[in-house]
Image (cartoon, rainbow, N blue to C red):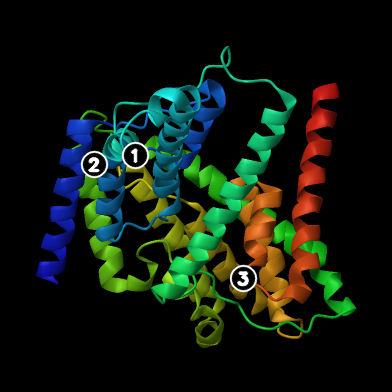
Amino acid sequence: MLSTLIFCLLGGLILGSLRAKWGNYPQTAHYTIDHLKKHQTVDYKPVFKNLLVALTILIFGAGVGPEAALLSSIVMLSIWQADKIRYLFFNQEVFSALNPFERVTHMLHPTKYLVMYNPTIAPTDKNFVSTKKAMNLFFVINGLVSFTLLMKLTKQPSFISKMGDSMWHLNDLWLFIPLIILGLLSGELYNLFKNKMSQWLNFWPNNPIKKALLGSITIFIVGTFLPNLLFSGQVALGSVPKKYVHFSVLILLFIVIVKLIFLQICLNTGWIGGDIFPIVFAAIIQGFAISKLFPSFDVIFIVATVATSMAVTILNSPIGVAIFMALFFPVQISPIIAATALLLKFTKEYIQKKTARE
């Protein structure tokens, strides 16, 4: 136990020192993508700082997902690659005149031979625009194929775990609206708690080492007593359908609360990462807890409805959450997931319009 504590404190010292030296890293995907939308480019020079700090956070077991910081770095590197391609486009004759060795050095040089996006010089020819769209589609397909091949070749386990089979019937629909309301209330309660946590932990703004050490102590406590809640929770999610039957409603709710508290402490003490996987993990556990209150109804129907409702309320992305959540459940439950997400989406839009008119 002492060695674990020392390891966690070492992680806090390293993380706090890096943030004290470099600033507020890692950048999240939300920040990077918002900056890209506003300015059509991002600063990719700190990409390796971003990756190093993100790697430190993941190594030491913070209760966050890897997706936010890693996606931010991918966006940075993608913009760097786009600037390289733009350099090729506008300097074709000069580049063609180079010998093979010079071409390679030009393309691999990290800071030179780049052309940033400039709307005033961007080609507007229809044929070019259509070709650009086709190339973008090719890049997307190429990325998906490459990812799949690498996963297969390196024999990596799937990051998606199925929650079990469903045999839901029309009688289960009697619970549909009540389950959505339960998920909605759970999500709203978390949003209130999230705002409070950001206020409570809004201290030591100029001392990132102290804040990181506070997060380290939390990681140590969780790792000692509930190690399955370390990281995003994604690794432990696959065993949930088999193990949840051995736990009571109160224990399952306790796990949800601890996971979400752990997530907020990490995010507010410098252990920054993604919140999608942790929230989905907590929402699914919440669904299994609620299912124990209705033993005569289909378990997966209840879990999917509650989890989707709670995750949509927290993440505020109905379509994205529905698509992501559907990966964890059998195909026959997909209409329920879609209906839950769309109902919440249209209800929120209706309330917003009504409020605006008043």
Quick check: can you spot residue 252? yes
Kind of residue sitting beneath label 1: Leu
Q: Is residue 184 left or right of residue 13?
A: right
Q: Residue at x 88, y 78 (%)?
A: 171
Kind of residue sitting beneath label 2: Lys
Mark 2 falls on what kind of element? Answer: helix
Locate the C terminus by quadrant.
top right
Locate the N terminus by quadrant.
bottom left
| Residue 18 lies in quadrant | top left
Mark 3 falls on what kind of element? Answer: loop
Q: Which mark is residue 322?
A: none
| Residue 123 lies in quadrant | top right
The percent position of residue 127, horizontal first and vertical second, equals 72, 30
Residue marked by disc 2:
211
The percent position of residue 225, horizontal first and vertical second, equals 30, 72
Residue marked by disc 3:
328
Q: Residue at x 41, y 53 (%)?
A: 263
Which of disc 3 and disc 2 is earlier in sequence?
2
Is the residue 123 above or below the residue 312 in the image?
above
How far apart, in angstroms, are the residues tagged by discs 1 and 2?
9 Å
The percent position of residue 135, horizontal first and vertical second, equals 61, 42
Q: Residues within 10 Å of mark 2 (few under 14, many from 20)?
A: many
Front of the two marks 1 and 2 = 2
Q: Residues within 10 Å of mark 3 (few under 14, many from 20)?
A: many
How far apart, in angstroms, are the residues tagged by discs 2 and 3?
35 Å
Q: Is residue 351 left or right of residue 317?
A: right
